[in-house]
Image (spheres, rainbow, N blue to C red):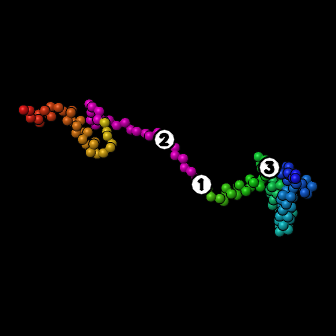
Amino acid sequence: MRFQVPQFIEVEDKIFGPLTIKQFIYLVGGAGLSFVVYTLIGNLFISVIFILPIMAFAAALAFYKINNKPFINVVESAFTYAFGDKLYIWKKVNKPIETREEAPTVAPDFYVPKLSDSKLKDLTWSLDIKQSQNPAQNQAGKKTF
């Protein structure tokens, strides 16, 4: 058995002359809201101030496309952004560290490396360095037989 597969499913059917059902509903809704505004205000010249933006919005909903997407998608995205939750992500900017050059209080003649494994190792290292630095004191303290 062969089945007929629908073609062109992205194109909406033109039901009301050159208008699709969505376009027709947007335009009729805009015209109905304009009529309600005219009946509430009563004066044609004052009501035109309110009717023109309503009809422009209805025409934009019916015909205007942004990046080949209907204008209703843009309006929906605007409401979602305005009234939805926002996620703020902080990006740390790495600034160079400013260091002040200070005059050294005592200029050592030798280099003593710092060990960071433990305080006890640091202490023994510094004691060993000081003893090897002043060998005369080591010899004076030792008794030779």
For residue 134, above or below residue 69: above
Q: Is residue 59 visible?
A: no
Q: Between tags 3 and 2, which lies in front? A: 3
Helix, strand or loop at mark 2: loop
- Please provide percent x and percent y for residue 52: 83, 57
Q: Amino acid at mark 3?
A: Lys
Observer-nearest of 115 and 16? 115
For residue 121, above or below residue 10: above
**Which residue corresponds to the image point at 62% horizontal and 58% vertical from the top-left?**
85
**Which residue corresponds to the image point at 8% horizontal and 32% vertical from the top-left?**
144
**Which residue corresponds to the image point at 85% horizontal and 56% vertical from the top-left?**
23
What secondary structure prevails in the magenta region? Answer: loop
Report whether 135 appears left or right of 27: left
Measured in 3D between alpha carbons, the distance from the residue under mark 3 to the one under mark 2, in whole angstroms, is 45 Å
* Residue found at the far left of this picture: 145
Q: Which residue is mark 1?
A: 87
Report whether 68 appears left or right of 120: right
Q: Amino acid at mark 1?
A: Leu
- In which image quadrant can residue 20 be found? bottom right
**Which residue corresponds to the image point at 81% horizontal and 61% vertical from the top-left?**
50
The question of residue 99 being in magenta is answered with yes
Helix, strand or loop at mark 3: strand
The magenta stretch spans which residues?
88-112
Q: Which residue is mark 2?
A: 95
Observer-nearest of 115 and 90? 115
Q: Amino acid at mark 2?
A: Lys
Question: Which is nearer the N-term, disc 2 or disc 1?
Answer: 1
Residue 65: which numbered mark, if any?
A: 3
Helix, strand or loop at mark 1: loop
Marks 1/3 in contact by CB < 8 Å: the verdict is: no
